[in-house]
Image (cartoon, helix red, strand yellow):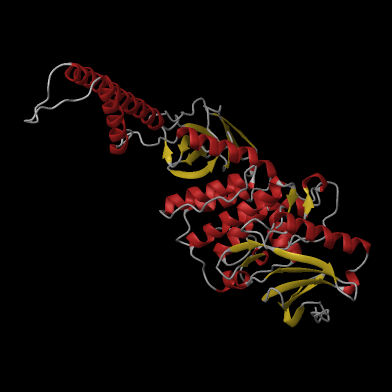
Amino acid sequence: MTRRLPSQPPVLPGFMHLHVLGSGGFADVFLYEQHMPRRQVAVKVMLSDAVNDNGRQMFQAEANLMAQLSSHPSILTVYQASVSSDGRPYLVMELCSSVLSDRYRRQPIPVPEVLRIAVKIGSALETAHRAGVLHRDVKPSNILTTAYGHPVLSDFGIAATLSQSTGEGVIGLSIPWSAPEVLLDESAGSVESEVFSLAATVYSLLAGRSPFEVPGGSNTSADLINRITRGKPQSIGRADVPASLEQALQRGMSRKPENRPSSVLELVRELQAVESELGVPQTAIEVAMDDWALATVADLEDRTRIRGVTGAVTSAKRRRRRAAVEQDYQAVGTVVRDSHGQRSTGTASAGHSRGMQVFSWVLVVSAVLVIALGATATMMLIRANSSDIPVVSNIAGEESGGVVRFSWTDPGLAATDSYDVRVGNEVSASQQSTTFTVDAQPGESVCITVTVNREGKTGPSSAQKCVEAAE
């Protein structure tokens, strides 16, 4: 099939065309230099053949979605959108590199780097989902890299709102990373299908090929669709990829949507658990919080912050308190000294005695307050550090069709807690869901234990639950 030539770049006021960056099915991307402020930008220009009412609506929808989401650090930034003098809509975007889409096929990317990319792009997807938007084309070539090495998700050109994701045909899709139900036209896209695409993308970055691609074999569209809808991906084939990571990706690419993690965030937490297993710092999850949640966090931090307990009575305060006591003492009677400098008796002496009593009582009260504050702070710290981590109990399990489904009752998880699920001796998932599924071979016995993880600390493990798959 002959590749088409790029379209003629439009004349844009305030921009100077430099060269073409790439071509797609509906648009070309050009490198321009913006005059004010002076910077290089990528400009996505719609093809003349695609400029019709439907095409304009699609392009406008993409511009609005990108503008809505591009404040996220891992979503490509859109600077402006308009229509050129020849009637073609265009987007002015942050200039990024597409080197990752070539690099993963040429050389192995270190596992920690892939996990970092996956958590950041997963955070972007989770943010889009919370805004009610599906990307519908997650794949390696849609992960770009900023000048500072930060991965960003691009191309929301076929995105849809979650409310519109069923019953409508998909405009376009990338077969190697698409979920079975999308390829079979059973769904136009869902959160679960995006989980599949993200897992398939992470697999590709590690394996150097798409999950169902057979090296040296036939990999036509029909071959890939047949494998995706009927089979399982092969092993990644890298000794440095831990089994827990393989299992997390296999679960993310389960044929049945209900057997996948219920959200991108759940898959991302599993990838964070692998980072901990490898001994590398966990990549931060970047998901925007609601205003009320931010206020709640701020209020909690303010209420639990202990200010100046050990040094509650400073020397300056003690000096001020002593000066006040001495003023009280002088009000009772004036100190009189004789020619030898000795204190005389009488009213002044009585005043001195009463003043010293007042001063002594003030010191006693101050000491009691300091001790009380110290004891209160100590109790607060003890209570903060000794809060029990809940324990999971009564795990239930059942097998059906080669899939074992475990479930348990929430023992009282906090908002930031998660469950570490171990299959055998390895952590296979870090999640907040109270269900967990495992593919099992006939006659295989699958055993799990569940532990609550609180701020990196784990509580006691549950009793082991085993289920044997039917022969």
How many numbered discs sit on the rendered protein?
Answer: 0
Q: Residue at x 62, y 40 (%)?
A: 402
Q: State left or right for residue 275 relative to residue 174.
A: left
In the rendered view of the protein, which quadrant contains the C terminus?
Answer: top right
The image quadrant that residue 431 belongs to is top right
Q: State left or right for residue 369 relative to residue 44.
A: left
- x and y, in percent, of residue 445 in the image: 51, 37
Location of residue 159 with respect to 465 vertically, above or below: below
Location of residue 362 with respect to 163 vertically, above or below: above
Towards the viewer: 371 or 340: 340
- x and y, in percent, of residue 47 in the image: 85, 73
The answer to whether any part of residue 90 appears in the image is yes
Towards the viewer: 204 or 65: 65
- x and y, in percent, of residue 274 in the image: 48, 51
Residue furthest toward the left? Answer: 340
The image quadrant that residue 342 belongs to is top left
Q: Residue at x 67, y 67 (%)?
A: 141
The image quadrant that residue 235 belongs to is bottom right
The answer to whether any part of residue 471 appears in the image is no
Residue furthest toward the right? Answer: 53
Towards the viewer: 316 or 120: 316
In the rendered view of the protein, which quadrant contains the N terminus?
Answer: bottom right
- x and y, in percent, of residue 311 in the image: 31, 36
Q: State left or right for residue 291 relative to residue 54.
A: left
Q: Residue at x 57, y 64 (%)?
A: 150
Residue furthest toward the front? Answer: 339
Location of residue 365 with respect to 450 vertically, above or below: above
